[in-house]
Image (cartoon, coloured by chain):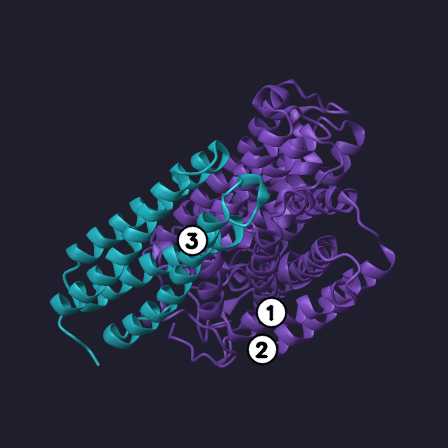
Amino acid sequence: MGEVKDYLGDYALAKVPEAERRTFLNQLMIFMGVLAVWAAVFAGAALAAWYDAVTLVVTVVIGCIILGIIAYLTGFIGSRTRASTYVILRHPMGRVVAMIAGIIISGISAMIWFAYETWLFGVIMQGVFPGVPFMKVEVASVWGGILMMTTALVGYRALSILSYFIVPAWFIIIPMALAAAIDVNGGWDALLAAAPPQPMGIAAGITFTVGLYIVGATIAPDVTRFSRRPHDGPLAWFIHVVVFMPIIMAAGGFLQLLAPGTNLAAFMVSLGMIWAVLVTGIVGQWSTNDNNLYSSSLAWCNAIPIKRVYWVAIMGIIGTIIAALIALGFGVSLQALLIFGTFLGTWIPPMTAIMIADYYIVRPYLLGEKDATKRYDWGPGTEYSMVNWPAVVGIVVGGFLAWWAPQVNPAIPGVGIGFGVSFILFLLLMTICVKAGIKYGLGKWIETEKGY
Amino acid sequence: MAVEVGTFRSFFTKLNLVTIILAITILILSMLSSPKAQGMFAAFAIIMLVITIIGQLRVSMAKELKQAGERAVQTVWIWTSFGFVPLTMAPTPYFEFTTPIMAAMMVIGAILLLLGAFLLLRIKKLTGVYLSV
């Protein structure tokens, strides 16, 4: 299959050419830029309602290792195929299901994240500058949303430059603030003695942690497709989540255990770290949210092929309006983040499981496509099925069980159930189909010259 | 405006040396301050020193101009970003810096940001590498 010309911009539906591929450090900085966000700190604070300091760290580290493994596997597909997540999904799910799945994973989810973090940006600005009209939550959400759209409009190069600019400082400033918070609130002894108000089983925290960032793990190919060597991007994802995410979540959680009801941003302001909060708040939030919007635009390009910049503008404006509406009527609540993280954790892992199962097991061992670079070949003229029904069954059954099982017993990890059931069911159905000669791909879609 | 790799290495070494001196200055200033500042800012200065020295070694070992340019850009991005740390954290009352030391820290932060911006643009011009390398 031939190389496709880049009609939509930033290789949304085209293979990333060799000249545009980036280094390991570039990929690490982009991923850490996504993580450099106050939402991750606040998520750690939410976990402090359930766990003491040691259990919190153990829970987060386990969740992060699971995320790292998942993203390594998805990211490697991206760096091998040079395709975005949504183009990759065409192979295991069929062309039409890939459009819908892409919209669920990123088209809408990433846009909601964009809206949520834009609102959070407004909350931080109001916290730092109370009483300033330009910094009111609803106003700061609007100008913050517009600011964050700018780099997403430019594309991958701008995402990289912004990440390089802020990430090293962010990951020095936040641990410094955490150290100060522990010192001011009684030190390590007080932290280790602090007990959570509503103790909970470790499975719920792992589910929460995985659910919090499962979209990021699933859409790792959006960035790793630019990876210079096949393992650079996946390894960068693994390192950023296993090494740095626990530090960020611990920062929020530890302070919450020591001084319940205090968030780290407000605490930093109380210590006089106003400029540090501003820099980490404005640029950190920006370096995360532009990635959300970028991925959302790629997903929409796979469904409706108009220029990527138009999708950035459309989704950015919708997300900014939602953020302003939340600011006007939704209030400030960590509970909202818990609900959202749990919801994502329910439906997206089944899709991720099917992508991994198809690329690493079905293609090489059932269909005999051993060459990893050829396994998901794509470009003008490539033939896809419209719907791959075993994938649809896997997603629906796995997603339902992931939602239902924790309702019966909260100790059951919904994310794990969803991922595991979908993975096994998809493999089982594909094995039966291949061995018995049953047609698993329904309909036919031939890729156009524009990659659609 | 491409240059010889040796000329570029020499140019980078001179400006990277400035960063090493600034990192050592932060280390010394933190040692002259309160125990709260000593630990955190000394750790920061050491991280900065290590990264700058590793960057210097990587550029010195580069075999061609493009490779040297890419490694130089990566190093400079990191210490440029580090400029935010003394600039924003030094004024914090928690660290109990005296006014002259606080001012010196903030000046160092500003120098890192400005020098970094200059050097990044210069490296791009000399080697032709992307800033988003």
For label 3, the residue is: B104
Amino acid type at circle 2 is Val
Q: Quadrant of the C terminus of chain B?
A: bottom left
Chain of the residue that carries numbered disc 3 in the rendered image: B
Amino acid type at circle 1 is Ser
Q: Position of residue B1 (x, y in %)?
A: 22, 81
For label 1, the residue is: A297
Q: Earlier in the sequence, mark 2 or mark 1?
A: 1
Disc 2 secondary structure class = helix
User: Quick one: which chain is purple?
Assistant: A
Amino acid type at circle 3 is Ala
For label 2, the residue is: A309
Is there one chain holding both mark 2 and mark 1? Answer: yes
Q: Looking at the picture, tell me which residue is in the foreground, A104 or A311.
A: A311
Is there one chain holding both mark 3 and mark 2? Answer: no
Q: Most extreme residue toward the right, as rendered? A: A329
Q: Is residue A113 left or right of residue A165?
A: right
